[in-house]
């Protein structure tokens, strides 16, 4: 397909740099850049929900959840209070 395309100066400079780096023609460089852009993941693809899988780890022997002082001693040590 033959078409006329007006490029912004910054994009034209990037295309020239890419052409010089790869040794490809303008047509090949533009087509490759367009392919990469169309194949790039969308924001919707990247916005996958993060989830944490929990695991039951049980309680340490002698750990009473109703004894706050005892829990603090277990976590911080008896001298922390």
Image: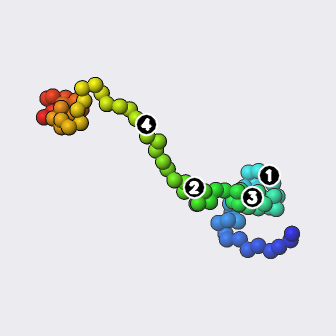
* Alpha carbon distance from label 4 to label 3: 43 Å
Closer to the chain start, of discs 2 and 3, is: 3
The image shows residue 29 at horizontal and vertical percentages of 77, 58
Q: Residue at x 80, y 74 (%)?
A: 4
Look at the image and name its color scheme: rainbow
CA separation in Å, label 1 and label 4: 55 Å
Going from N to C along the chain, the mark reached first, 1 or 3, is: 1
Secondary structure beneath dot 2 equals: helix
Q: Is residue 42 above or below residue 67?
A: below
Q: Secondary structure under badge 3?
A: helix
The image quadrant of residue 63 is top left
Decide if residue 33 is in sight here: no
Horizontal and vertical percent position of residue 57 = 38, 32
The first of marks 2 and 4 along the sequence is 2
- Disc 3 target residue: 35
Which marked residue is nearer to the observer: mark 4 or mark 3?
A: 4
What is the spatial separation of the Cα atoms under label 2 and label 4, in whole angstroms?
Answer: 27 Å
Identify the mark at residue 63; answer none if there is no mark: none
Q: Do the numbered discs 2 and 1 sit on residues whose CB atoms are within 8 Å?
A: no
Residue at horizontal 70 percent and vertical 65 percent from the top: 12
Quadrant of the rendered image containing residue 26? bottom right
Q: Which residue is mark 2?
A: 46
Q: To which residue does mark 4 refer?
A: 55
Looking at the image, tell me whether mark 2 or mark 1 is earlier in sequence order: 1
The residue beneath circle 1 is 23
Please tell me which of labels 1 and 4 falls first in the chain: 1
């Amino acid at each position: 397909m033959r078409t006329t395309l007006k490029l912004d100066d910054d994009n034209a400079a990037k295309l020239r740099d890419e052409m010089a780096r790869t040794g490809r023609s303008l047509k090949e460089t533009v087509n490759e850049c367009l392919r990469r852009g169309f194949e790039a993941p969308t924001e919707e693809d990247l916005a996958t929900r993060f989830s944490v899988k929990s695991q039951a780890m049980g309680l340490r022997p002698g750990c009473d959840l109703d004894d706050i002082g005892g829990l603090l001693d277990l976590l911080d040590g008896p001298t922390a209070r």
